[in-house]
Image (cartoon, rainbow, N blue to C red):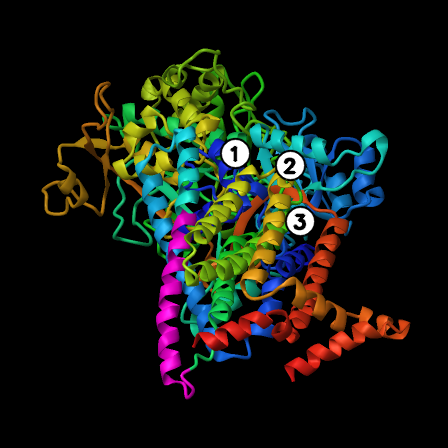
């Protein structure tokens, strides 16, 4: 910086610095570079990255330094023609609004060598007809149905669960694709296009043209086996190994009604457990953009609320059986979390094993039910002669009668929808049901897409409410989800052997549901969440907000890869702490005791986890009181067994990995015409040649030219 | 093809300096040493003025735009003055070194004249200042973008290159004239050099209206070239002699049978042999 500054003062181009004085907030500190006169960095962008599995690579790739193309805004069919054939300045980077981001357009662009990249401007609301870049039959090869198990049901033969799915997320693009939200940056790009790339009166646009560079160079190629082999070579032979890919992994959250001894693994004699499961993750076409409203949040908020509702009765009237709440991570990617838990149960590495499971209730997508109509899906293959299952269904149906909900079973021959339960069925014919809001195809029109957000779930607030008021405002969605949570809680209680007398005192609180919906879908950095989590996570919550200026930020539910700075994903932390606060008890311990309660009487780290929680912050203070919560809530690895077993081409377990990348960058700038560039080169060569000739000539005649000097110098000494 | 811009600008900015170095400096080790030492002296002046500038910017209020602009102008003036001070310091050093060189040589004659030293030292100053003003721009000229998205001129790179070339040559000429002024104890010459340096630096404040800064800089450069030529022993007479005898026109003149000119040239040749 020092040298650059002074160069500008001296003889270079003070104009640069002068102009900078007006643009930059800190003149002379961060803006003396010529770069800032050339490039407009786009910071609020999200790339599509490369993922790999046993057989394929999907996602996007750019060259090492990024792909550059002349910007063209796609608005009509003619724009598409311009990009694909008629435009005179290929390659092009296409800027499109989300409506054009569909399979047919993208496949046309994919097939053209004239496309250097795509930038998609995401609008607030999704297309009315629906949009899902996911498969139409999610996780079809990792579920239970296969040639050996219900072959007539395999591959969505009976029901196509996600008919809107266009599989765009599973295409392999050779150019980078970035997303940006409607706003300032999108306007800057459009203005640059309008100013420079539109010819006058229909003529071809004249240079300089506005161009865009998108950089998202991915290190991994081909498939997981290839990239894991390269990782292996790196770790063996390189002093500073540079890995090319990482397995998608995070943590499952589980908790039990009665504490289970975490130090003992494997079968527990005499223990019979009802599992209540749901999933924690979602995805979209773009990296780490996964609001997952209906596909994840609706389900796990319901289960969290149910766990909270059960607390009122279980202390005085515990049911005869235990209930295990599990929240699976990475289910979107071939059931990472549930397959790992089943694997651990099979191999005696979990607190219980498969024989301990009495039955299973899974909460699927439940937030979009119409008139309180819910559906109980069960497996047509294993349901023959299962009394437990019919008991479970009749339990739920009868419970629903007291609520404003109705529960029904779909057609007998219909298979299970994509669900974690399928992974349990692969191991054992466990009786169980999946509770959803759809009879056959998903009611979610934006499955695993960017638009599956708060707005889609109708989590919206009257205008003029402050964040604190929004947090407390009970939305209609929260009311109906609380009903569902009550249904789940009561059915679980009954299923676990609880008495009917106490059912009426199990009620999910709509206020808690609305707070959770606000935190998980609208703004995770809110006072309620901050009061429930540890001080460290509060710091993360605040720093995780990338663009504080652009409004509230919900957490993203893409499972991702664990990093040293971020070993557990924020949603996992949040769910763990919320669950701990809902099911745990307050202990009168200091912060140090809370961290290490082993020596204290009546405390056990084997039975419980201890959480130091910040507590509510009083109005005129910055720090809460802090208290210790004891709860049987734990995290277990959601890391696909395929990586444990080194079976990178496994057909049984998820093999999804995420490529590492060099840098993610998007910027716009002008490109000069070829003529000007060649002119510069020509002038340069001419100057060089002329100076060589002139210097040679003058030097050879220097004696003659400077005759008098030679004489004077000769005499001078 | 931003590479074309890179090479074009590099040739424009450093072509003359390269030619001068190759034909007049590179063959003689003493000149190379003086050149590099000159470049080093310029660097020292840069270091000092950067330091002052840095402190000034850090100490001042960054929000105050007019103050910052004033600081910038102050920095430019200060830096120019400092460069001329270092040029003088370098002159003193070379003068001392020259005595030493003369003492150890066989004929008690220095192997290099003061005019030559002045030229080499000036070129050293010019090359280093050219490098510092151009290298960052050159690295950005590699693209992929070019200046202009904020409405700036798209000729930024090429004008910067021409400005750098002018500064390099100007430093060379200033060196010659400055040393001559010191040698003859004509202090107004030194003052004139410093004033012109200030003027040229000040001209770059007119950017980005390049028509305001580039042509005056080149006019000054041509004038300085003439001044340097005369101050280092050149004259109209020698110029016409060389032009007449060695220019490509010579052969044409010969064929046209103008014998008096031919005689004159021969006369010069005889005189020098």
Q: Residue at x 44, y 25 (%)?
A: A517
- Magenta stretch: helix, strand or loop mostly: helix
N-terminal of the two: label 3 or label 1?
3
Q: Judging from the image, what secondary structure is the residue with disc 1 in?
A: loop
In percent of width and height, residue A685 lies at 71, 62
N-terminal of the two: label 2 or label 3?
3
Q: Residue at x 63, y 27 (%)?
A: A126
Disc 3 versus disc 1: nearer the observer: 3
Q: Quadrant of residue A693?
A: bottom right
Q: Residue at x 53, y 33 (%)?
A: A295
Q: Residues within 10 Å of mark 1 (few under 14, many from 20)?
A: many
Residue B107 in magenta stretch: yes
Identify the image quadrant of the C terminus of chain A: bottom left
Q: Judging from the image, what secondary structure is the residue with disc 2 in?
A: strand
Q: CA distance from mark 3 to mark 1?
A: 32 Å
In percent of width and height, residue B158 lies at 65, 50
State whether discs 3 and 1 lie on one chain.
yes
Q: Which residue is mark 2?
A: A120
Q: Which residues are magenta?
A: B79-108
Residue A473 in magenta stretch: no
């Amino acid at each position: 910086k020092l040298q650059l500054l002074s160069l500008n003062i001296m003889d270079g181009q003070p104009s640069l610095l002068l102009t900078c004085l007006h643009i930059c907030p800190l003149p002379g500190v961060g803006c003396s570079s010529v770069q800032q006169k050339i490039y407009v960095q786009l910071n609020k962008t999200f790339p599509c990255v490369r993922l790999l599995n046993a057989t394929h690579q999907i996602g996007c790739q750019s060259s090492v330094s990024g792909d550059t193309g002349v910007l063209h805004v796609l608005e009509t069919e003619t724009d598409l023609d311009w990009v694909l054939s008629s435009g005179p300045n290929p390659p092009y980077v296409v800027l499109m609004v989300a409506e054009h981001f569909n399979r047919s357009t993208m496949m046309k662009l994919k097939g053209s060598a004239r496309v250097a990249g795509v930038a998609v401007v995401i609008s607030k609301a999704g297309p009315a007809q629906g949009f899902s870049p996911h498969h139409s039959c999610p996780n079809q090869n990792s579920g239970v149905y296969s040639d050996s198990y219900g072959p007539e049901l395999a591959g969505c033969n009976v029901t196509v669960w996600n008919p809107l799915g266009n599989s765009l997320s599973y295409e392999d693009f050779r150019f980078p694709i970035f997303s940006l939200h409607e706003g300032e940056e999108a306007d800057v790009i459009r203005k640059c296009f309008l100013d420079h790339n539109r010819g006058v009166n229909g003529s071809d646009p004249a240079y300089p043209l506005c161009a865009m560079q998108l950089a998202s160079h991915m290190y991994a190629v081909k498939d997981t086996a290839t990239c894991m082999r390269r990782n292996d070579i790196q770790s063996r032979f390189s002093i500073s190994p540079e890995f090319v890919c990482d397995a998608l992994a995070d943590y499952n959250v589980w908790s039990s009604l009665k504490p289970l001894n975490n130090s003992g693994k494997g079968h527990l004699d005499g223990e019979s457990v009802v599992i209540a499961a749901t999933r924690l993750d979602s995805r979209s076409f773009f990296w780490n953009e996964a609001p997952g409203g209906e596909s994840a949040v609706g389900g796990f908020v319901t289960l969290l609320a149910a766990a909270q509702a059960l607390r009122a009765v279980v202390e005085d009237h515990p049911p005869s059986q235990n209930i295990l709440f599990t929240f699976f991570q990475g289910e979107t990617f071939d059931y990472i979390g549930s397959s790992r838990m089943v694997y651990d149960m099979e191999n005696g590495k979990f607190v219980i094993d498969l024989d301990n499971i009495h039955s299973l209730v899974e909460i699927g997508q439940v937030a979009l039910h119409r008139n309180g109509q819910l559906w109980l899906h069960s497996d047509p293959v294993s349901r023959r002669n299962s009394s437990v299952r019919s008991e479970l269904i009749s339990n739920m149906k009868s419970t629903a009668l007291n609520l404003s909900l109705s529960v029904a079973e779909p057609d007998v021959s219909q298979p299970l929808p994509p669900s974690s339960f399928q992974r349990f069925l692969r191991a054992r014919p466990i009786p169980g049901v999946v509770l959803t809001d759809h009879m056959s195809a998903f009611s979610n029109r934006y499955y695993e897409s960017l638009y599956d957000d708060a707005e889609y779930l109708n989590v919206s607030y009257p205008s003029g409410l402050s964040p604190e008021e929004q947090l407390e405002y009970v939305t209609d969605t929260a009311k109906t989800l609380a009903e569902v949570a009550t249904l789940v809680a009561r059915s679980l209680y009954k299923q676990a052997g609880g008495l009917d007398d106490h059912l009426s005192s199990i009620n999910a609180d709509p206020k808690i549901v609305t707070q959770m919906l606000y935190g998980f879908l609208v703004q995770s950095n809110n006072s309620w969440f901050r009061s429930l989590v540890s001080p460290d996570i509060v710091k993360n919550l605040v720093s995780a907000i990338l663009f504080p200026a652009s409004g509230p930020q919900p957490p993203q539910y893409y499972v991702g890869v664990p990093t040293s700075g971020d070993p557990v994903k924020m949603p996992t932390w949040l769910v763990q702490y919320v669950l701990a606060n809902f099911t745990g008890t307050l202990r009168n311990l200091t912060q140090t005791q809370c961290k290490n309660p082993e020596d204290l009487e009546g405390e056990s780290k084997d039975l419980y986890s201890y959480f130091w929680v910040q507590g509510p912050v009083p109005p005129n203070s910055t720090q809460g009181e802090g208290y210790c919560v004891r709860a049987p809530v734990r995290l277990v690895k959601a890391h696909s067994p395929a990586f444990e077993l080194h079976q990178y081409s496994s057909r049984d377990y998820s093999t999804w990995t995420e490529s590492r990348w060099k840098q993610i960058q998007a910027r716009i700038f002008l490109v000069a015409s070829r003529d000007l560039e060649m002119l510069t080169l020509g002038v340069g060569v001419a100057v060089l040649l002329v100076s060589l000739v002139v210097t040679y000539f003058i030097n050879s005649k220097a004696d003659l030219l400077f005759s008098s000097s030679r004489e004077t110098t000769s005499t001078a000494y | 093809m931003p590479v074309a811009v890179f090479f074009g600008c590099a040739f424009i900015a450093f072509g003359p300096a390269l030619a001068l170095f190759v034909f007049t400096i590179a063959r003689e080790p003493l000149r190379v040493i003086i050149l590099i030492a000159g470049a080093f002296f310029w660097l020292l002046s840069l270091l000092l003025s950067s330091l002052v500038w840095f402190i000034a910017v850090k100490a001042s209020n960054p929000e105050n735009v007019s103050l910052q602009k004033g600081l910038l102008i102050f920095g430019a003036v200060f830096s120019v003055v400092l460069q001329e001070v270092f040029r003088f310091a370098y002159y003193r050093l070379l003068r001392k070194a020259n005595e030493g060189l003369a003492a150890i040589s066989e004929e008690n004659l220095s192997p290099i004249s003061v005019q030559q030293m002045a030229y080499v030292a000036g070129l050293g100053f010019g090359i280093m200042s050219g490098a510092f003003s151009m290298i960052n721009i050159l690295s950005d000229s590699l693209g992929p973008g070019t200046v202009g998205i904020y409405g700036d001129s798209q000729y930024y790179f090429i004008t910067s290159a021409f400005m750098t070339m002018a500064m390099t040559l100007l430093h060379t000429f200033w060196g010659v004239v400055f040393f001559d002024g010191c040698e003859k104890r004509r202090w107004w010459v030194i003052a004139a050099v410093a004033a012109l340096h200030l003027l040229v630096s000040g001209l770059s404040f007119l950017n980005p209206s390049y028509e305001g800064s580039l042509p005056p800089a080149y006019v000054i450069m041509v004038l300085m070239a003439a001044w340097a030529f005369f101050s280092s022993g050149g004259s109209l007479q020698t110029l016409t002699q060389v032009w007449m005898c060695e220019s490509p026109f010579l052969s044409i003149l010969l064929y046209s049978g103008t014998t008096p000119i031919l005689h004159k040239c021969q006369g010069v040749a005889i005189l020098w042999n």
